[in-house]
Image (tube, rainbow, N blue to C red):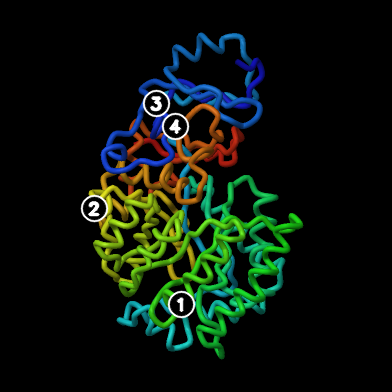
Amino acid sequence: MSSNNRLLVKNAQQVVLVCNNGEKFLTKLGMQNLCVIDNGSVVIGSDGLIEAVGPAEVLCAQYSDASFDHVIDATGMCVVPGLVDAHTHPVWAGDRVHEFAMKLAGASYMDVHRAGGGIHFTVERTRAAAPPELLASLRGRLVRMQRAGTTLVECKSGYGLELQTELKMLEAIEEARRTLPINISSTYCGAHAVPRGKTVAEATEDILRVQLPTLKERMSTGALRVDNIDVFCERGVFDLGSTRAILQAGKDMGLNINFHGDELHPMDAAQLGAELGASAISHLEEVTDEGIAAMATARTAAVLLPTTAYILRLPQPRARDMLEAGVIVALGSDFNPNAYCCSMPLVMHLACVNMKMSMPEALAAATINAAYALRRSDTHGSLEVNKHGDLLVLDTPRWEHLIYQLGGHQELIRYVVINGNVVVDNNKTMKL
């Protein structure tokens, strides 16, 4: 036991550990039976890691002579793990608010795409943006996510579609990682769309022969840290063959496979991802029964994005079928110019209402399972000893209010803590 510690959160009415036996993920029954301590406390050591979590009276006795840099009296409040957003596109210039009207009038995602909007609209503006502009907007978006309780976020490139802009985006993500408290998992997504003027074959060749080799060089020198590789596997975008080639090349570089699949059409992307040992596949609105079974067997996480289905009026991802089949279900906001959502509490609410998940399932999907999708569940996603001291203190007597109160997180989240440091101190919470 350390005598000098970073943080004590004491006397919480509920401490939601999520899991407490070192599980790297939860499925089915485990997601329905989260580990919760009534009247609990949490100790975070000087290294920013959780040193102890348990009943308040036990920790009070154990740490009676210890000193703390900061003490939070959480009487009448709840503590939950920091939320994990497993899928975002936060680096871009120019918004697409005008496209929202098109969608409301009935235009589909691909209708907007063919009309010159969508990804290509953002690509033009991101290519033209100066690096300081991209970094400033990225920082603002990440701070908003942090205020909403996200403490670990996946951040993609993908609005460059050519080497220099993709590197510019990844460099912005790297600078944010170095300068902001929020934890970041960085994803190269150069295969987000086929650039104008190129065929699928030409775009694939450019990624394989130009972009990935340069990225590998930058990673080897330590100039960039990239964790994952992503491809938009979709009809009219990257087919199964090109997706396989790009993902395998990334895997050979040491990147985790974490890609868009089976969103608008059934592409057998889930089976491909399972075959390649993908960490995660996102979207999956059109996944087949065979794809679900393959993901369950391979322990490939399904990152479901209820905001996208909601905004585009797509069929909801088959969360219940996946859960029943034993798939590791995670959640993400899909923050991007098409789905402008910074709030994982809102994502969890939509998952419960529209995808028929229970509140415990949604919290597990937004913590331990989302961390697993990013290969971070050994360090993040639950309140267990030796994990990162990332947590939320909620000014409410039951943790479920974080999901139940639609859009209410600003009045509920009293503190956001990352590595034992209070990064959000919100004195504007309101009692029920």
Kindly identify the amino acid type of the residue bearing the numbered disc 2: Arg
Kindly identify the amino acid type of the residue bearing the numbered disc 4: Gly
Give the residue pinned by disc 1: 238
Q: Residues within 10 Å of mark 3 (few under 14, many from 20)?
A: some
Q: Nearer the viewer, mark 2 or mark 1?
A: 1
List x then y, in percent, for residue 412.
42, 41
Q: Earlier in the sequence, mark 2 or mark 1?
A: 1
Q: For the residue labelled by badge 4, is the local secondary structure a helix, a strand or a loop?
A: loop
2 and 4 marks in contact (CB < 8 Å): no
The label number, if any, that marks residue 154 in the structure image:
none
Tell me: 118 left or right of 296: right
Real-space CA distance between mark 3 and mark 4, rounded to the nearest whole angstrom: 28 Å
Instruction: State the image quarter where residue 25 is shown.
Output: top left
Q: Earlier in the sequence, mark 2 or mark 3?
A: 3
Q: Nearer the viewer, mark 3 or mark 4?
A: 4
Q: Residue at coordinates 65% horizontally, 29% vertically from top-left?
A: 47
Q: Nearer the viewer, mark 2 or mark 3?
A: 2
Q: Earlier in the sequence, mark 4 or mark 1?
A: 4
The label number, if any, that marks residue 76 in the structure image:
3
The label number, if any, that marks residue 320 in the structure image:
2
4 and 1 marks in contact (CB < 8 Å): no
List x then y, in percent, for residue 230.
51, 65
Q: Is residue 55 above or below residue 27?
A: above
User: The N terminus appears in which quarter of the rendering?
Assistant: top right
Q: Report the front residue among 332 and 28.
A: 28
